[in-house]
Amino acid sequence: MDPTCVLCIECFQCSAHKNHKYRLSTSGGGGYCDCGDTEAWQSEPFCDIHKRGLERKDKAQPVDNLPVELRLRATQLFDCVINYAIDLLMWQNCIELPDFVKPSHVCEFHVTMLFNDEVHTYEQVIGALVKAVSCTQKAASDFATIVDREGRSIVKDGSIADCENAKKIIMKATSRGQNNKPLKVEVMHSVVVAHQTFALKLFSWLQKVMSCSEGLRQLFSLQIVKPRADGQCSVVQRVMTGDTTLWKMARVQSHQLLMSGILMDPECKKQFAIMFTEMYPQLMKSFISDDHDHSFCVVAQSVQLFTVPTLARLLIKDYNLLEVIIETFLSECKSKLSPSGILLFERQERHLPFRRAQYTLYDLKYALLGRPSPEEWDDSLRSSFLRGFKALLKLLRCMQGMDSITRKTDQHIEYEPEWESAFNIQLKLSDSLAIIQDWCSSDKKVLTDAFISTVQQLDSPQSNHKPEKCTIAGYTAACMKHDFSVNAISVHQPLTRLLAGLAAILNRDEISLEELLRKEKISISTLMEPSILVLVLMAQCNAGMWRRNGFSLHNQVFFYQSPKCRTEMYDKDVLMVQLGASLMGSNEFLVHLLYKFGLTNWAKEDYDTSVTQEETVKQIITVAEHLLSLIIFIICERYTIGVGKVHPGDSLRREIIHQLCIQPMSHSELTKALTEDPYKETHIEEAVESVATFKKPPGVSGKGLYELKPEFYIEYSPYFYHYARTDQVKSEETQRKRRGALGENTALYPPALPPFHGMFTKICNLLQSDVLIYIIKLVLLRSTAKWSKSWSEAQLEKVLFLTALGIEEEKKCIANELPFSFSHKATAVKNGHSIFTLLESLVAQSNVSHKGQKELLACVLQNMIELRHSHGSTFVAKTSPMPSSPSDEKSEKEKKKKSDMALKRRERIMAKMQKMQRDFIKENKELFESTSTEMQAVPNSASMDTSTATDDLMCPVALGAKRSLPGPPSDRQMCILCQEEQEVSHSDRAMVLSAFVQKSTVLSKNRGVSLSEGQDTCNPLFMRSDLTRGTHTSACGHVMHADCWRRFYEALLSKEARRNLRLRLQQNSFDISKNEFLCPLCETISNTVLPLIPQLSSLIKDGDEKEVDLSLTDWLDGLQKTVKNSIQQHRDKESQEESFLFVPCPLSTVTKMMTESVARNFQLLFDYVYDDDGASANFSDSITEMLRKFSQDVYTTGLGVLPDEQNTRVPIMVWSTCAYTITSTEQCLRAEGKALFGSLATRQADCISALVRLAAVCSHINTPTTVKEHCVTLLSALLCTSHDVRLHEIPCILDIDMFHLLVSICLSMPTLYAVEDEKSSSKKLNVPLGCLNDSHVLHLVFSAHLVQIILSTVIEDSGDDFMDTDIDFGAEAFLKVFLEIRHNAGIDENDGQKQYAAFRVLRHVRDASLPFLRCAAIFFHYVTSVAPPPGLLEPAGDEFDLLCHYLNLPTCFVGLVKQCDLLANLVKGWSKDERTQWRLSDGKSGNEKLVTYPLSVNQLISLPLDFSDLINQAATFTCPKFLNSDDSRSPTMCLVCGCIVCSQSYCCQTLLDGVHVGAATAHAAACGAGIGIFIRVRDCQVLLLSGKTKGSFCPPPYLDIYGETDEGLRRGNPLFLCEERYKKLQKLWQTHGIAEEIVHNLESNNGFTPIEWQNL
């Protein structure tokens, strides 16, 4: 019933309205829940919670249930407290207290109090405070935040002189600028401030007291509404009159006190409403002069009073509420009136007070929402309503003719006139005008009196111009001349339009309109004059005749016909013209139209022979087309109640049909094109569902569309009066295409129309009027002429449409036995022509070339012949009614002939190609046979699953002595800049990929850890097992020459340097200071380049690689000796300075401690290939430079430090980003259920390939000593025992990510024993190739990873387990190893030897080890270039065995860890290590949880399915800086961790890298390493952040039932979580694509206003 009524979330969730149509919105408070208000809801006014209270409710008043003593005591207490609080809050003397609270002795301590206004900005206030009180920027920002939230704040304390000085500085600093109004600053005594603060506490206490007892609440309400005994005004009146003297927090508290007290009691609410109405003019004047927002003023309580129907009607009836409201607004309009009494607005004038006065128009609408029924009218209500109506007419009289203009013919206007203010008033009055007409329609006496009053207001003095006689087709009419270049015209004619609306209602009620006009002695031509002139203005604007009047007129024309305004503007003008057509003679009316449109000369037969300028002719043609359209509208628009015999919903249904005839529309597009219901009822959904079907979107990003049901296409009219020109053209094309596809006639014939009602039936006489017959014949005659300067296709189409309308109208008259002479006049020959003969002559005319025109012409002719035959006429048509042009038949024959010729030519070409192919095969028979043999011998990947394939191809091995051969290199690339192709080579020009390096926490399992960056103590050598923070690298896949890229980048730098400083400060999609740029081809964000390295196996010559047979035991023994001797050497150093890195001992020292055979193989394993000519390992200078650049970029970006080529952490960061990128890729593939190989996008595969190869050769640019030291340190983490010194410097085995360790060891191992020989010219090749070294490293690291899995496993008994025959029968043996390792670590198991547990444990360990094996497979695939097994190319199947075979690992875990005694001892040592045991106990205690395996793929947080639940969750969040304040204005939830922050607010700004940033930016830096993904709850919007300077908004994952998002909650439809969209958002985060998405959004929205993202 009441569109302003709301429910709180608790009541809504427990009410029947949850399953109804409702609107969703968020607010900052200011109202109360309307649950239980029977006047607010048509049904179900109570929720389930409050229904229970109805049973306990008795008839006695709550106050009567209070004990007498309590009532007396409470009355005295309430009176004392409320009067004290109001006296102190409204006390204007800032230095002294009132006498009744003045203390005997007061210390002289004063404060400078700064008050809030809605004029000055945050920056102005902060700047003034910095100067005045010498505070920091942060302190000033906090002051400004407090002032904005609470309304005032103490900014300085001390002596009165110091405070006065601060006051002067603030007022002086804020008085500059456009407003010249300084901030309000007062010097107050501290005692006054203390009392006022206490008074606010009392207000809060009173609210708590009232919430405890309904009787106390009623007692308090009665106490404050009654007048005081001393004759002074009541407490409520004092609060209302002094409202503008209070600051924001005091106002809020007083309003909440009113709502929690008075407004909860019906009788008190009634008394309060009466007081409010009586004081309304005074309150509004105070509000207009105030500077606070409307929601913080007492006049905002009008929505709580005027929207109650019974209360509003009482105020209208007994207290003239309508008149009071309108007269209040009129009093503010006086200063804006011109000498003629019309509102006049100047562009330079400040309209702020007048804009505030327009809030009265909202109150007018609220008061009118409760429409009375016919039974509720009485004389008193009629009298009061008509008084208000006459006041409204006075307002409309002031609006009649606003912004009048004359047509400029000589020069363009000098400046654009002000036009927005007039339309703002119109927009605010539109709903009220519609509702007022509904009020009038419910009582005939009121309707008649209202109509007469409106006519009297329009009865203005006649124009000075004498009427001119105009004759057309023998008919003469006296017309008033209006020269637009002399006489002003305005689009604002509200009186005329109100009269048109009332006239339609009169006609509906069968009240004689002619009789009323006759009594008032006013002609219909005078009444419709303004509407016709506005329609002429529209036609002339479209014809370009007002182009010199600027854009302001075009804007007015747009809004005049827009859905927001057209109901009370354009539609009413058409209705008024229809009224004129019904009350005037048809011929006279058409002559009037032709005269007003300036078409009297055009209507002459000799117009084509007259001399006229070409531009004028074009304008006349366009105006004539608009005239014909208007005539069609007058005849066809019968769907208004009172005009046609239609039902209330028919007009809306017709509107929807015609909108969907343009194209299928989404719900938002459709509702935007429709006029909004003033009562905010949901009739639109019902109407849409009756005529259209909803098609859900096929994909994630699409919208659901409404498609018109087939049976309603018959109601389509191409000349629908709400169509713009583009809409009409598009709808015609759509309908013709649709009909053509169905094989139907494409002629757009008029649809069946409902009959007119009452006096409007006379409009049909237009079709048989002589003037219209003449116009039709004139246009047809010009169409048949060989040349006519005044003819157009649009005129012909409209004339044909009018002819069809005449035919259809005559058919209806015949069916109803009514006379109609259209066909008779159409076939009557005059001056040698008739409409029928002219139509016949058009059949073969070239002017009718369009297929739709031809078919419409044929339909008109056919129907006219049938109609005349029904009258008994015997004439015969000279031509066929369904014409077929000879030229058309000839063109069809030519098309068929060409098609046959093309088909034969194609057959000849194909036969020739087949013959050439057969001849070529015969000539090269031997070549084809050899090719076939080779393909059989070496099957490709597509034939690997055949039974004849070799084991080497079916199950390739990537590591060890028996590894498979690498695939052929295919490294030929094309530069996207110079388009030159080149093979990737280590000695040629470098080729690079555009790459983007970023810090990442996407894989983090512990977001509570903060790592120090940029410090010397931060060493990233060992990646934490929880992957807290890493460095990710991505690339777009586009290749460039390094020198080409360098020139491109230097040109970009020069371009940025040349940019204007102002432009440089604008928002940019990339930050050149951070080396960022966009890929030249795809514009993907990049900040470095990734050099391409050829296949690693191609860097050595064939035959140079030596076969080595060295057992794992001997290999481990050699490395262990190396580590121990390195530690021993470190012990022997005299220096006491501790170093984190171990210094490796030489290879010769290690081999001396081995047997001769083992030493020889160990030596051979680390014996590097020498190349005499130095070609195999000498990288070109270009490649070396790019290697250094990428390494430095990863180092600086990953650690957040300055470049340093000598830093020992540079190679570590390259290895780390390689491992982290592979881990991230594997998790993304696992999350999507894709195959490990074959599912990667080309750009991902290219990036990982280039990254792995670069990491493998990065030792080329680093000193071997540094790499060797890193290698020894890495090995010591696995090979050291607890007795070794400095073991405490190395992390516990449980805290190391083993895949990162594997990558780092494999990439540094080749350099472990390298010897630098400066004298030798040969270079040593130290790259991993997948040899025995890499295989043994993998065995060692994988064993350590198994220990991690075993020690972190939590065993849970499940009695329903069963034996899995797919698992190897060695499960029992593995269980023993499993329990032994856990026992060594101090973990005791109870009853762990059961048979079912063995299989379950083995399954768990296999599954837990899969992510490591998958990552290792990706890494070694790109190291060795050995093709993966076919089984890993498909997503289905068991991967474990395939991965183990590919990586040369045993599938039996027992065989792995027990492979040799040395490895078994290492496993035992890892589990028995005291740090491991301490870590296990510490992890259990909860200090820092252990990482469990397999590492799960991180997901975004789970969101509630219903968006209202999310709003309710965020509603409980308050700003952490102001816990006692109101809710956060912009609560923003991190989708990564679920934390809610107070975004876009100065209150929660923090300092980040020396810059003040918002809470969301600061949280993104801590939680996402600078990358953030948030949802702004109140705006229903996803926020993406990248660093401090870039961000973008994107649609949320919440959709309504129509498949659309609702950013900003503008439509308010219920929203529900779309899992597919959320998964898409999650994939964007998981794939590290947020930075790239932000850049693409910024590039596509580059013209938008820049946003200061750092403040969010």
Image: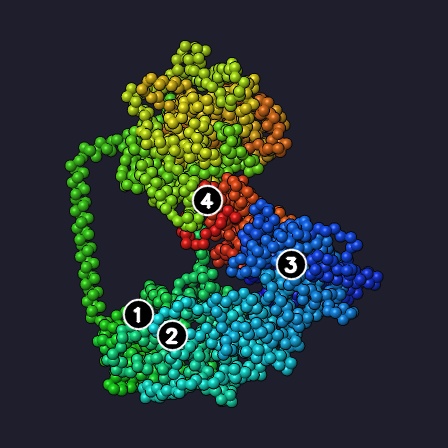
Crowding near the residue tagged with mark 2, few <14, some 14–19, many ≥20 C-alpha atoms within 10 Å: many
Vertical placement of 217 versus 1240: above or below? below
Residue 650 seen: no
Q: Nearer the viewer, mark 3 or mark 1?
A: 3
- Mark 2 or mark 1, earlier in chain: 2
Q: What type is the residue that disc 4 sits on? A: Ile
Q: CA distance from mark 4 to mark 2?
A: 54 Å
Q: CA distance from mark 4 to mark 1?
A: 51 Å
Q: Nearer the viewer, mark 4 or mark 1?
A: 4
Q: Nearer the viewer, mark 2 or mark 1?
A: 2
Residue 1110 seen: yes
Q: What type is the residue that disc 2 sits on? A: Arg
Task: Residue at the far front: name it.
Answer: 161
Q: CA distance from mark 2 to mark 1?
A: 38 Å
- Mark 4 or mark 1, earlier in chain: 1
Give the residue at mark 1: 852
Give the residue at mark 4: 1634
Please name the residue shown 37% across and 39% down the image.
994
Give the residue at mark 3: 247
Give the residue at mark 2: 407
Secondary structure beneath dot 4 equals: helix
Crowding near the residue tagged with mark 3, few <14, some 14–19, many ≥20 C-alpha atoms within 10 Å: many
